Structure formats: C-alpha cells, structure tokens
Image: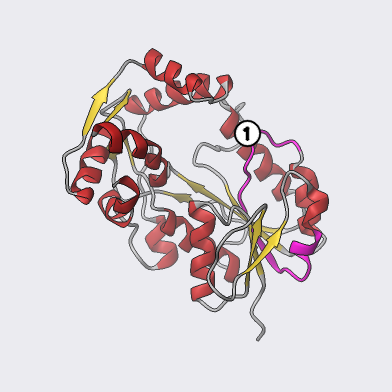
C-alpha cells in the first residue's frame, strides 16, 4: 500500500515542526510549506508557498493526500480560497484549532476564537475529510518569557496563580499524525490538554529547575501588562481579549482530560518535562 503524501503548513513553527519530524520518523512522505529558506531532515521536501496567497499553493499541493493546516493570521479572510485550493488536490485536512471554540451557538468573544470558529465552519462544509484539534494553551507560549528570564531572572506578568493544563507541542503533533495517517479521528474535534494544571508561578519555577538557576515570577497589574503588550506591538483587539479571558480562567479553569493518551497510547507530557526539553531556549 502506498503511503499518503502529507503537506504540513506552519512547518517552521513548534507544532508544525514536530508534525514534520514525527511523520518523517514514521516513514511517511512529507512536504513542508515554507515562505523562505528553512532546514529540515534529509528526505523532507520543502516547497515554497504562502497561505496569504492561495494562488501560490499549487505546486505544494500537487499529489498531496492530506494537509496539516495551521492558520497564521488573526482573521479568516482568504481562508475559503485556501480550503478550496486544498480541496482540488487533497482528500483530508487536519486543522489546528483551539479549545476556545465551542459549539458555535455563541458569538466568539475574541479574535482568536473567532477565526478558529470560522475556519472550522469552512472546513466542515468543504466536502473534505477533516479533523479539528482543539488544544488548550501551548507550553511553548512560555518561550515568550525567555529573553526576560535570561536578562533579569524574573518574569513580570499578571495572574501568578493562573493554572492551565499546558500541552507539549509534541503531544499535539502525535495526535495530528494519527489524524493524518489513520481514519480514527475523522469528523472529530478532540479537546487536547496537558496532564495537570500548573500555575504561571510554578511554570517559571520549573523552567528554573530545568536551567539550573532560580527564576522568579513577579506579579504585575493587568493594566500594566496590557500596556506592555501594546508597546510590544500586539494588536489592540488581541490585548483587549486575552487578559480578561485569562482572568476568567481563575474562576472557570480549563478542563483536564486524557485524550492524548487515549488517542496515541502514550500519556501527555508534563510541563516539567517540557521545560527540560526546552532548557536550552532559556539559557
């Protein structure tokens, strides 16, 4: 039986990169969609294309059976054209969505949930086979603290006690590989979580253990955090949505489940393990 050829978008990112690595290790023919130069393992074909320009995707999609789709924009504009291009070549798409997407009955409260909701709708009505992965917060988002931790030994941020079941990108990728290469998740929207909630304060301490030096979490007010985000160039609509959504999790925490283990047969990795895996990024 011929192995399917799979195109991975977001291939230079944490999740997409892990999908490429795991597919390649399993002997599955894999292409990586890139906009510029990038290094991949020998045997992985890098193909130029841009999701912002659907007309540029033809060569990357030629002969492809399935696509792992990571949407890199804050709005769904252009997504219908991309999905249409995918449908002219592939039979299946596995979409990296978000745990924030609900049943579609309520209006999304933030731009991230809004575009994920629309992408799921477009994919669901496209005629393609599909799976929508809905992970909770990515452990890799804490890499945004790396420069500050290296420079000062501390993170200045709000909500020290906010606990989230952050998920390792390799676990998301492992579920994606199952969805891309088997029929077990067709039409499914699995909620994917880490194994336990870990507070932001604990996250910093665990990173400190991994790098071998004490690191601190210094709590600041949400208003100061919002100003820091705006100064860093985050869109105003994102700043207005993210901090209130995080604060709401104090009273309404994200669920924890064993979906990663049920789907892959391997328990989800802990944040402690993630920190060890990424210690070099914080040194």
Tell me if residue 40 can be seen.
yes
Outermost residue, top direction?
A: 223
Which residues, given as a range, are shown in magenta? 58-77
Q: Quadrant of the rendered structure where residue 147 is?
A: top left
Magenta stretch encompasses residue 208: no
Which residue is farthest bottom?
A: 1
Q: Residue at x 76, y 71 (%)?
A: 63
Q: Main secondary structure of the magenta part?
A: loop
Query: Looking at the image, which is closer to me, 90 or 74?
Result: 74
Q: Quadrant of residue 156?
A: top left
Query: Which residue lies at the image location 62% right of the left edge and 35% below the top edge?
Result: 104
- Left or right, 80 with reference to 205: right
The answer to whether residue 93 is above or below residue 253 is: below
Is residue 62 rendered magenta in the image? yes
Inspect this view and state whether residue 182 appears: no
Mark 1 Cα within 10 Å, few/some/many (few <14, many 20+)?
A: some
Which residue appears at 70% of the width and 37% of the height?
76
Secondary structure at badge 1 equals: loop
Q: Position of residue 176 (x, y in %)?
A: 53, 60
Residue 3 at x, y percent in the picture = 64, 79
* Residue at image location 46% in from the left, 23% down from the top: 229
Q: Colour scheme in the image?
A: secondary structure
Q: Nearer the viewer, residue 139 or 145?
A: 145
The vertical placement of 16 against 138, above or below, is below
Residue under numbered circle 1: 74
Near-viewer residue (145 or 265): 145
Give the percent coordinates (x, y) of residue 123.
71, 49
The spot of residue 154 in percent (x, y) is 25, 31
Q: Is residue 165 left or right of residue 33?
A: left
């Amino acid at each position: 039986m011929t192995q399917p050829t799979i195109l991975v978008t977001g291939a230079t990112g944490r999740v997409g990169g892990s999908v490429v690595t795991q597919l390649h290790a399993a002997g599955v023919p894999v292409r990586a969609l890139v906009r510029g130069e990038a290094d991949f393992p020998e045997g992985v074909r890098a193909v130029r294309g841009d999701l912002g320009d659907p007309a540029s995707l033809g060569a990357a999609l030629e002969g492809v059976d399935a696509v792992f789709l990571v949407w890199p924009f804050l709005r769904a504009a252009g997504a219908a054209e991309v999905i249409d291009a995918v449908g002219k070549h592939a039979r299946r798409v596995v979409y990296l969505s978000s745990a924030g997407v609900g049943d579609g009955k309520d209006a999304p409260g933030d731009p991230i949930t809004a575009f994920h909701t629309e992408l799921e709708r477009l994919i669901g009505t496209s005629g393609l086979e599909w799976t929508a992965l809905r992970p909770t917060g990515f452990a890799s988002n804490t890499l945004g603290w790396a420069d500050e931790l290296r420079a000062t030994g501390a993170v200045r941020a709000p909500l020290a006690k906010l606990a989230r079941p952050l998920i390792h990108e390799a676990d998301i990728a492992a579920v994606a590989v199952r969805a891309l290469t088997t029929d077990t998740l067709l039409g499914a929207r699995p909620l994917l979580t880490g194994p336990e909630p870990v507070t932001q304060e604990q996250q910093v301490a665990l990173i400190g253990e991994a790098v071998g030096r004490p690191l601190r979490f210094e709590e600041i007010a949400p208003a100061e955090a919002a100003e820091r985000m705006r100064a860093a160039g985050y869109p105003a609509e994102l700043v207005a949505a993210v901090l209130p959504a995080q604060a709401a999790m104090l009273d309404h925490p994200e669920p924890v489940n064993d979906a990663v283990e049920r789907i892959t047969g391997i328990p989800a990795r802990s944040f402690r393990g993630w920190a060890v895996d990424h210690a070099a990024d914080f040194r």
